[in-house]
């Protein structure tokens, strides 16, 4: 199973990706976490990425595209993966698509986490108190939300046109949201994967959750 998550900062991508990965025995690939590890280790990549991350901007496409590829290849041979926060721009999505198609391993589903801005700000303010992430200051959060609207939201239409988009209601208790996602993925496994269905048909299956 090859799944990607699209959602604004604070939508619960990391929280849910961890649970989904455990449930289906998938590898979770979270570029944000990998970048923070590079920053913490003080590598050249980390030092360069840090200036973008601290401002709440996206790290340049070529950097994250290069970071993702080997991990995706490895995870694909180990039962599949869940991409938490990649692709995040149309050039990243196009690069991922061309590259995956050339190897016959396209994405199966793109889950879009839908959630209002008020809830996001409250969640991230909570995390700022608990974890002290350097990009969780209120002004930076607002900028990350704007970056999401401008650069990442167009991916929703992109994946809808490709017939693999599923909208997920990302408001509510963590467990309830996990149930919605698992129901979608189990539907997909039972119907689309088992039948070897063509991609566009999948869009009419699980509908919105
Ligand atoms: P990244 O680390 O991916 O951050 P993000 O997308 O801004 O998202 P967050 O991690 O803040 O939120 P989340 O959706 O994972 O929610 P979470 O589960 O943590 O990226 C950081 C930076 O790295 C980017 O700004 C960019 O610079 C760079 N980067 C990453 N990917 C890139 C790419 N592809 N291209 C270029 N640059 C890239 O939940 C948030 C909080 O809410 C937690 O405290 C959690 O406990 C809580 N919570 C979760 N679910 C619920 C719930 N249902 N109810 C109440 N609270 C909840
Ligand atoms: Mg996250």
Image (cartoon, helix red, strand yellow):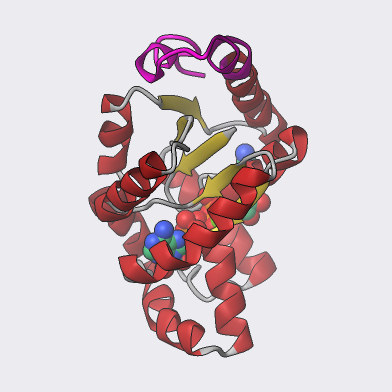
Q: Is residue 64 left or right of residue 92?
A: right
Closer to us: 130 or 28: 28
Give me the residue at 66% from left, 33% from top: 173
User: What is the magenta range?
Assistant: 188-209
- The image position of residue 59, as x and y in percent, is 37, 70
Q: Is residue 22 left or right of residue 98?
A: right
> To which quarter of the image does residue 25 belong?
top right
- The image position of residue 115, as x and y in percent, is 45, 37
Q: Is residue 156 above or below residue 118?
A: above
Is 200 part of what is drawn in magenta?
Answer: yes
Give me the residue at 64% from left, 45% from top: 77
Closer to us: 35 or 200: 200
Residue 136 visible in the picture? yes
- The image position of residue 61, as x and y in percent, is 32, 65
Q: Is residue 196 above or below residue 48?
A: above
Q: Is residue 58 above or below residue 29?
A: below
Q: Is residue 165 left or right of residue 44?
A: left
Is 124 part of what is drawn in magenta?
Answer: no
> To which quarter of the image does residue 139 belong?
bottom left
Give me the residue at 53% from left, 47% from top: 83
Closer to us: 55 or 78: 78
Give me the residue at 43% from left, 67% from top: 66
- The image position of residue 44, as x and y in percent, is 48, 90
As drawn, which residue projects farthest toward the front? 103
Residue 57 visible in the picture? no
Could you tell me how many numbered marks the image carries?
0
> To which quarter of the image does residue 186 belong?
top right
Q: Is residue 162 above or below residue 84?
A: above
Closer to us: 195 or 119: 195
Q: Quadrant of the N terminus?
A: top right
């Amino acid at each position: 199973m090859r799944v990607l998550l699209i959602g604004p900062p604070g939508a619960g991508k990391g929280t849910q990706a961890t649970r989904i990965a455990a449930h289906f025995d998938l590898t979770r690939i979270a570029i944000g976490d990998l970048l923070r590890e590079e920053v913490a280790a003080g590598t050249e990549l980390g030092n360069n990425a840090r200036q973008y991350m601290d401002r709440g901007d996206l790290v340049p496409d070529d950097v994250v595209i290069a970071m993702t590829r080997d991990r995706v290849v490895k995870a694909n041979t180990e039962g599949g993966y869940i991409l938490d926060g990649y692709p995040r721009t149309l050039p990243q999505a196009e690069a991922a698509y061309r590259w995956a198609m050339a190897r016959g391993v396209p994405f199966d589903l793109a889950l879009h986490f839908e959630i209002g801005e008020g809830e996001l700000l409250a969640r991230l303010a909570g995390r700022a108190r608990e974890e002290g992430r350097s990009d969780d200051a209120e002004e930076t959060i607002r900028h990350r939300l704007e970056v999401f609207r401008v650069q990442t939201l167009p991916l929703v239409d992109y994946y809808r046109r490709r017939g693999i988009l599923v909208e997920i209601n990302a408001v509510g208790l963590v467990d309830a949201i996990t149930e919605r996602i698992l129901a979608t993925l189990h539907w997909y496994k039972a119907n689309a994967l088992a039948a070897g269905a063509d991609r566009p048909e999948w869009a009419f299956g699980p509908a919105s959750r």
